[in-house]
Amino acid sequence: MTSSKKDVIIIGGGISGMSAAKLLQEQGLDVLVVEARDRLGGRTFTQVDSTVGYVDLGGSYVGPTQNRLLRMAKELGVENYKIQEVERLVWVDNQKCYPFTGTWPRFWNPLVNIDLNNAIREIDRLGDMIPVDAPWDAPNAEELDSMTMKEWIDKTCWTESTRRFLTMCCSFMLAAEPAELSCLFYCFHAKKAAIHVLHHQGPAEDGAEERKFVGGSQQLSIKMGERVGKDNIKLESPVSKIEQSEEKVVVQTINGDVFEAKYVIMAMAPSMTQRIHYSPPLPPRRNQLIARAPVGSVIKCMVYYDRQWWKDRDFCGSTFNVDPASPMVYSLDDTKPDGSFPALICFVAANKAREFCGISKEERRDRLCKAYFNAFNGAEEALHPVNYVEKNWMAEQYSGGCYTATYGPGVLTQLGKELRKPFGRLYFAGTETATHWAGYMEGGIQAGERACREVLHRMGKIAENEVWQDEPESKDVPALPFESTFFERNAPSVPGLLKFLARTAIASTAAGLLIAWRLKNK
Amino acid sequence: MTSSKKDVIIIGGGISGMSAAKLLQEQGLDVLVVEARDRLGGRTFTQVDSTVGYVDLGGSYVGPTQNRLLRMAKELGVENYKIQEVERLVWVDNQKCYPFTGTWPRFWNPLVNIDLNNAIREIDRLGDMIPVDAPWDAPNAEELDSMTMKEWIDKTCWTESTRRFLTMCCSFMLAAEPAELSCLFYCFHAKKAAIHVLHHQGPAEDGAEERKFVGGSQQLSIKMGERVGKDNIKLESPVSKIEQSEEKVVVQTINGDVFEAKYVIMAMAPSMTQRIHYSPPLPPRRNQLIARAPVGSVIKCMVYYDRQWWKDRDFCGSTFNVDPASPMVYSLDDTKPDGSFPALICFVAANKAREFCGISKEERRDRLCKAYFNAFNGAEEALHPVNYVEKNWMAEQYSGGCYTATYGPGVLTQLGKELRKPFGRLYFAGTETATHWAGYMEGGIQAGERACREVLHRMGKIAENEVWQDEPESKDVPALPFESTFFERNAPSVPGLLKFLARTAIASTAAGLLIAWRLKNK
């Protein structure tokens, strides 16, 4: 049993916890990071070996408007590179390949085009009404939070293609099925960037998947760890108990170690705080919240090939699998920027991921190769991988899944206010508590630094209005202004079009009758 | 650090764990019960003191078809008594009192009567299609599990009164809002008794709340504990870690105690198993399940008076509060059978409970008294309580809420199969794993005894077909046959009635025209 007295103990050595620890230490405080795993990084985890070079098995991407992440990476000397999407993307449905260029495909059926456009525009519109720091205060919060995203999709969309696309968006963005998600939560999440939604989330230029870090994203946590110092970090130390009094907090691990501090920052997904026994117990509403915030279900899978054969066929590697029969949801080229380790990365998410748990690793690989074969228009090369790497985040007892907490109906409006509310000497970080890019690395840093400043304020070191801080835009990766097209802004919805057509038909008939009558009576 | 080697360790000293422990010991095995709290009983908890006599703050009621519970109570010498509902019940809406007799009120608006009848009949019909041991195998499981109960209510019900009534049923039966519940789960839960649903759940004769135990329900666990023996029970021992190998399981508590056994039975709500660290970790799908099984939100409140004044006004004390403005959901007379400690008991559940956390105990009492004042038609006596006792189950870190685990859309069909699936040397009891009256004390006993027999089978002591055992019907409390009325079976739904009326109108008009034509042409 070791004992140690610190100013602040940070539980969780992911990107959020490490951001808090780093900033606290820079302010001259004595910190200790206590991490359950044998590594830092949390939901970012980079495998490094000779078979793959390096590969991010968890959170990986960075894009414009993620300014804290870009700032932190720059400070730590971690460079990024742009994902190349020069060749055609693919929309996969009914096990067929529909290549396209640009952000979204255009469909031969004009109803699908206006339906898809209308759905995205509606999600934007709803997002615009939701305050990022208090989604429960949106004017229509109760209504949106009493319906699932599936219900909203069924009500809003007139075409099967649009419904399948939005289902894919839920799987891809939150690793959950539409029926599991509150509509309020989905629109809040889609709004995360505080800019237009899906346009900045797609893989394309200016999206959330625009870039990756050279050497992998886990480096951020590792390099922050180097600054914080080995002696201030305890790995393989799952916390089993937190006991707080008026003077201090005592943190106990399952190894029997005991640490003391003035304050504790919990930097993990809300549901993970259930691994800990509390004395005194958590307040009733927080106790209810943490049981209602499951993390998504996802397996990240990398198939390696001897070369980027998809490029020969004028495909960039990106596929949107709206096809329920496809095991994957979304894929991207994952070849290193220097062309080494040619690979395709894909996300198997939500129900597809849960079902994928039931088969062997070899079968998973084979099914994915078959899916690439279909997606790339019968490309024989897809069936001959040279290596396969996967990471099933559902199995991780210290993540509970990936990427982030998801909320069903009722949770945000009834319990959301508890997310960031300190409990005695406990403060809450973790990307789920962010107001900007919650669920992403960017949100993790915002949350960690905010929690750090909450503690600094509590200690009397900074003023209350310094707790929340805006971040200046990255000069290296500025966001492009989002410019919607005339079509995107003005195209009608399907019911709008039908109404218009009906009115036109009535008006034309009336006009025709009038003209006929005038002619007759001339 | 104490160490001890046992055949089976049971984690959780509630009614399910104690049933397992008792049966295992009767079979000659060496058992140890490890319980987090300083008492046995889990979600049953009886306060005993001079101000209340005794009062059940948790699970309390017993009724026909709960034959295991009746058998166990008889064996342990715990008697029961019938709740008296001689006088009028009350339906409360718009802060007004609508007294009635019988199971359901009859409304002045005939549409409400047929709408309510149709909704209950539909839930029965859906329940009939759901296998009790595998709701995920119901023919329409996917469809029902992709919709919330709110969605189903909105689609099925034509009148606001019926919608409010079913909302109240969700709150009362599961301490959750309709939008939080999968329709499949609700219908499965309502079917629990494997008999007709709501008819056996109401407070009336032959329902789930027909009886209570003299002296309180916690006695069952305490008396089972006496049989198991003090030395075989460790209280105040929250488990922090379970480590299993091919030979044994090692259980560690936050006090540093270490216990060894051949097998472990986990007898708690699925979400509570998240308090524990596992080595090896739980399988991915179980890991996902336990994060998606929140226990309901409820506060049980008892208001004591100097006499049963409601009886003077020809009210039995039972109220159905469909009124969103009422803080409570459901109330019952809780006076002791000998007439002592006159009291009304009520359930504050779901959103009402979460909102109730934000005010003081005095304010809660005052609001409830005001609600009784309204419910009992302006009874001044309601405002003059002599004592107030409450139990907020949301605050209990070792229950996570009450009464039972609830499931949103997708959970049962995707992850439900994990509920009872053993993991290595770990077996799962707890009322949530039952196939009969899951979520009730009866289900707890079924689950505990089944888990016990699973271990016995694993040890080669019984055959596989002996694991699941039917229970003969209690001779003392037999179930009445459920007899539906002609109206209940044959009344149309609202759309059915409208269709009938439209057809009748068309047919009458046609007949009229035909007769007129015939007369004219005579």
Image: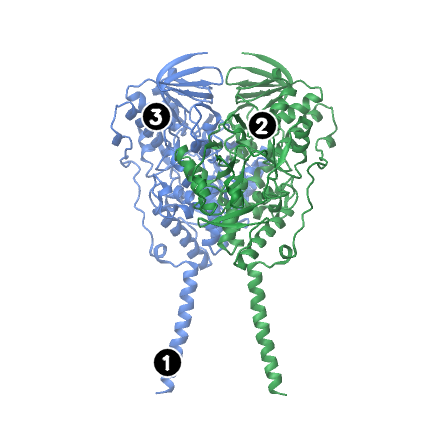
Chain colours: A blue, B green
Which residue is identified by label 1? A515
Residue B17 vs residue A90: left or right? right
Measured in 3D between alpha carbons, the distance from the residue under mark 1 to the one under mark 2, in whole angstroms, is 87 Å
The quadrant holding residue A16 is top left
Which residue is identified by label 3? A20
Do the dots labelled 1 and 2 sit on one chain? no
From the viewer's perspective, is residue A366 above or below residue A396?
Answer: below
**Which callout, 1 or 2, points to the residue nearer the camera?**
2
Of the two numbered discs 3 and 1 on the same chain, state the one appearing first in sequence: 3
Amino acid under disc 1: Ile
Measured in 3D between alpha carbons, the distance from the residue under mark 3 to the one under mark 1, in whole angstroms, is 76 Å
Picture coordinates of residue A143, whole percent (x, y) = 42, 48
The label number, if any, that marks residue B218 in the structure image = 2
**Which callout, 3 or 2, points to the residue nearer the camera?**
2
Return the residue nearer the eye: B116 or A83: B116
Q: What secondary structure is found at the residue carrying circle 2?
A: helix
Q: What secondary structure is found at the residue carrying circle 3?
A: helix
Q: Are marks 3 and 1 in contact (CB under 8 Å)?
A: no
Measured in 3D between alpha carbons, the distance from the residue under mark 3 to the one under mark 2, in whole angstroms, is 46 Å
Q: Are marks 1 and 2 in contact (CB under 8 Å)?
A: no
Picture coordinates of residue B387, whole percent (x, y) = 46, 32
> Which residue is found at the position 68% from the left and 35% from the top?
B67
